[in-house]
Image (spheres, rainbow, N blue to C red):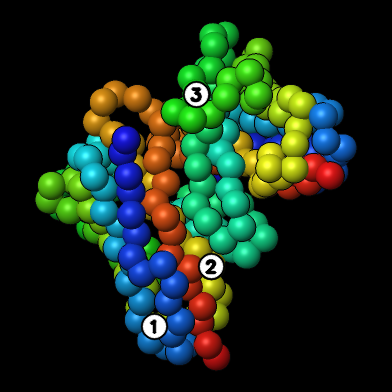
Amino acid sequence: GQQVMQIPQYQHVQEGEDFTTYCNSSTTLSNIQWYKQRPGGHPVFLIQLVKSGEVKKQKRLTFQFGEAKKNSSLHITATQTTDVGTYFCAGTPTSGTYKYIFGTGTRLKVLA
Amino acid sequence: GAVVSQHPSWVICKSGTSVKIECRSLDFQATTMFWYRQFPKQSLMLMATSNEGSKATYEQGVEKDKFLINHASLTLSTLTVTSAHPEDSSFYICSARSTGTYNEKLFFGSGTQLSVL
């Protein structure tokens, strides 16, 4: 079945350093979404990317969708302690269904 | 933004009993809801897709007789864990797909921590 992998699994950074998580799907996606889950909380929607090669920015966060629509990345510039949490990508296959397959997640810790 | 309410937040039950979890979309209609299971420090595993007025679609390896899903209205889906066993202990979370104004985002409930003794 379809798999969505993320690397790295864990990342510890010093506050102020940059952080990137990569998302790779075994199949082509119609769109990809990113979510953030704080410890003990539920996933919260961050953004959706639809177009091949699309790049979107939200303040210090930059999201990219690959040209082949099989991979994506999330980059955080100058991390802050509030960025702590697990970041998940979630992809919808091009088969026409609306189910979202979540990536394995990247857990980010920011050291003050 | 849209709100999805999930109850209960946590439940402890004895082995062999059944537990019902409710997922409600409070300010939008959700024709499709999804049920996920999450183990500690792991990703969300899609269990089933719940469609209003029709049978749920279960993912491979998920027992439909074990995890009963009912989506009787456009705002409510329920997951019943039947004859629960300790291995069913997990964090269960629902989400509702919102179209139109919210551009097909997924909104998540706050989750239910199930502990089976």
B56 sits left or right of A34 in the view: right
How far is mark 3 from mark 2, CA to CA? Answer: 29 Å
Looking at the rendered image, the disc whose residue lies closer to the viewer, 2 or 1, is 2
Vertical position of residue A51 compared to residue A12: above or below: above
- Lower sequence index among marks 2 and 1: 1
Quadrant of the rendered image containing residue B16:
top right
The residue lying at 64 percent from left, 30 percent from top is B25
Name the amino acid, label 3. Answer: Tyr
**In this figure, which residue is indicated by the disc labeled 1?**
A78
Q: Residue furthest left?
A: A67
Residue A83 appears in the figure? no
Vertical comparison of B33 with A67: above or below: above
Which label is found at residue A85?
2
User: Which quarter of the picture shows residue A56?
Assistant: bottom left
- Residues at marks 3 and 1 touching, judged by CB atoms closer than 8 Å: no
Disc 3 target residue: B58
Q: Residue reaching furthest top?
A: B53
Which quadrant of the rendered structure holds the C terminus of chain A? Answer: bottom right
For the residues labelled 3 and 1, the Cα–Cα distance comes to: 41 Å
Residue B35 position, x and y percent, is 57, 33
Left or right: B12 as drawn, with respect to B86: right
Element at label 2:
strand
Q: Chain of mark 1?
A: A
* Disc 2 and disc 1 in contact, CB within 8 angstroms: no
Query: Which quadrant would residue A98 be assigned to in this image?
Result: top left
- Most foreground residue, A68 or A77: A68
Chain for numbered disc 2: A
User: Which tag is nearer the camera, tag 3 or tag 1?
Assistant: 3
- Per the model, the C-alpha gap separating discs 2 and 1 is 15 Å
Name above or below for residue B66 compared with residue A106.
Answer: above
The subunit carrying tag 3 is: B
